[in-house]
Amino acid sequence: MSSITLKEVLEKAACRISDSENLVYGELDSATASLTKVLLEAMAESEIERRLGVRLHERGETRTDHRNGYRHRTVQMSYQVVEIRIPRLRGQGFVPSFLEPNHRAIGEVEGWVSKAFLSGLSRSEVIRLLESTTGCRPSDDLLRRVQLDLDKQVKAFRERSLLGRYQYLFLDAAWAKDIVGINATRICIMTAVGVTHTGEKEILGFERTPTENESGWRGFLSRLVERGLKPTDLALVISDEHNGLLNAASEALGDVPHQLCWAHRMRNVRKAVAAADRGEVVAGLKLVYDANHLRGAKDSFRLWEQRWSDKYPSVVASVREDLGYLLAFYNCDDLHWKYLRTSNPIERVFRELRRQQYGCGAFANRDACNRAVFRIFNWLNELWKGKDIWEPRSRKNKRRKPHVDKAA
């Protein structure tokens, strides 16, 4: 038993469309709606003929049931809404494969709505967009099903096994407004970004916490280790100056060297000194992390210390106390120094997150926040997949090196 052929579909289309000139000269929306209606009805007829074993008005010993007229059903697509005729059977129910029982929208609509959510559209924006394109509001069940599917994707993203061998680990937290209205509060989104030995960057995970403290970071890092992060592979951990993070990293990851962000330290130093001295203080401190080797960095610090220890003793003491953390990047490959001495690589992640958060004002609930964060982080991981972040830097360094004439 063969299904309905394309020729038969076109013949039915010619019979069903009363004004064929409308296809060429008329309104495009109505023409495509008519063609879509014919196509869906032909698909339903083809499926029911395969089930019965005979075509319409045919007899045969292989018949398994009998037709029982038609019923009309509204079908919502991602670009229009049509009403189609669906054949009925006497002995059993029949729903075409492109529809689901008690669902008005076809499967592609859920995929379209899911992509819209992952692209950053809010629930209200998706509703308005579908209303403007199809003339029909998506049902609450449809939106709920899509959001439940996205929640499963979020859970899978946060609990996936970490299979890479990560050489560097960036840690930081972003703050966002949670809950709309008078009960709005700020929440912390702890984030970890890893760089593998092959130079591929990846967001390893994120967690929401009410505050950024040592216990929160300890639990977050411990769960990363449980998922497959190997502290023995890490050459350096990079973060800001949060004391709780430093203690948690030491406890969860062991004696992995820790690099404090120079960008955060320079901002703190600028705020602590007089405006008249800021230019000279910052310029002198910049020579420390711009040195060509560790010994030169320490020599530059001693000169800077002698210059400012009398006028700003507390500022100089704070830098001296954390100097080991600030110069830890010198023990890594010199190609990586500029990339590792600040937490700027993870700020790129937070920039996208803030753009999403500012667009909606505040996250409506925990699940909405997780979906928005997952959308951005998953998109960035796909963007970074298979790319070596060290390759452009290596090519740039080669261009800067002077040409050496081997013949000479």
Image: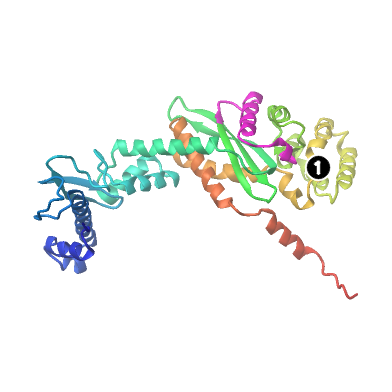
Residue range in magenta is 208-237
Image spot of residue 238 (x, y percent): 71, 39
Q: Quadrant of residue 213?
A: top right
Q: Tally the numbered discs.
A: 1
Tell me what residue is drawn at x 59 percent, y 51 percent. 384
Amino acid type of the residue that numbered disc 1 sits on in the rendered structure:
Val
Image spot of residue 355 (x, y percent): 51, 44
Image spot of residue 168 (x, y percent): 70, 43
SS at mark 1 in the image: helix
Tell me what residue is drawn at x 52 percent, y 44 percent. 378
Q: Quadrant of residue 34?
A: bottom left
Direction front: furthest residue = 61
Task: Decide which of 73, 115 is in the foreground and name it.
Answer: 73
Q: Is residue 176 visible?
A: yes
Is residue 382 within the magenta segment? no
In the rendered view, does 394 fall on the left or right side of 383? right
Tell me what residue is drawn at x 49 percent, y 43 percent. 375
Q: Is residue 280 visible?
A: no
Provide the residue designation for mark 1: 281
Quadrant containing the C terminus in the rendered view = bottom right
